[in-house]
Amino acid sequence: MSWVDGLGFCASFAVLASFCMTTIGSLRMFALASNVLFSTYGLLAHIYPVVFLHMILLPINLLKLYRLQDRKPAQA
């Protein structure tokens, strides 16, 4: 197994970890990590549909995380 394949496995584990998160903030952080890892993996392995998908998902996850951080806590 090459180090590029190892990078792909790390990206896959980041996706798996995101599905195990209990809060949306943690989910978005792991999703962002997987987007970066998969984009890098796709570029190095010349798998351009993977690069395309994760380059589209990256700003979506950034925006969702930003909006989540921008929310004010509900008043009781």
Image (cartoon, grey):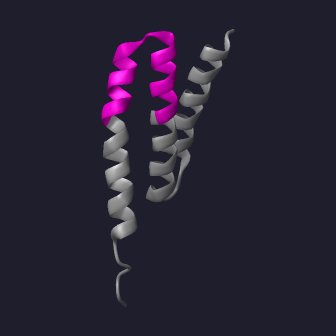
Instruction: Identify the image quadrant of residue 8.
Output: top right
> Which quadrant is home to the N terminus?
top right
Q: Nearer the viewer, residue 27 or 50?
A: 50
Classify residue 57 as left or right of residue 4. left
Magenta: predominant secondary structure element?
Answer: helix
Does residue 4 lie above or below 15 as drawn?
above
Instruction: Identify the image quadrant of residue 46.
Output: top left
Does residue 49 lie above or below 20 as drawn?
above
State whether residue 19 appears in this view.
no
Question: Residue at horizontal 53%, vertical 51%?
Answer: 21
Report if residue 49 lies within the magenta region: yes
Q: Which residue lies furthest to the bottom in this view?
A: 76
Q: Nearer the viewer, residue 39 or 10?
A: 39
Position in image of residue 58 (x %, y %): 37, 39
Classify residue 36 as left or right of residue 73. right
Classify residue 29 as left or right of residue 66. right
Position in image of residue 14 (x %, y %): 56, 36
Report the magenta residues as a range: 36-56
Question: Residue at horizontal 57%, vertical 41%?
Answer: 17
Instruction: Identify the image quadrant of residue 67.
Output: bottom left
Report if residue 43 lies within the magenta region: yes
Position in image of residue 23 (x %, y %): 49, 59
Position in image of residue 33 (x %, y %): 52, 40
State whether residue 54 appears in this view.
yes
Classify residue 2 as left or right of residue 51. right
Does residue 17 lie above or below 22 as drawn?
above
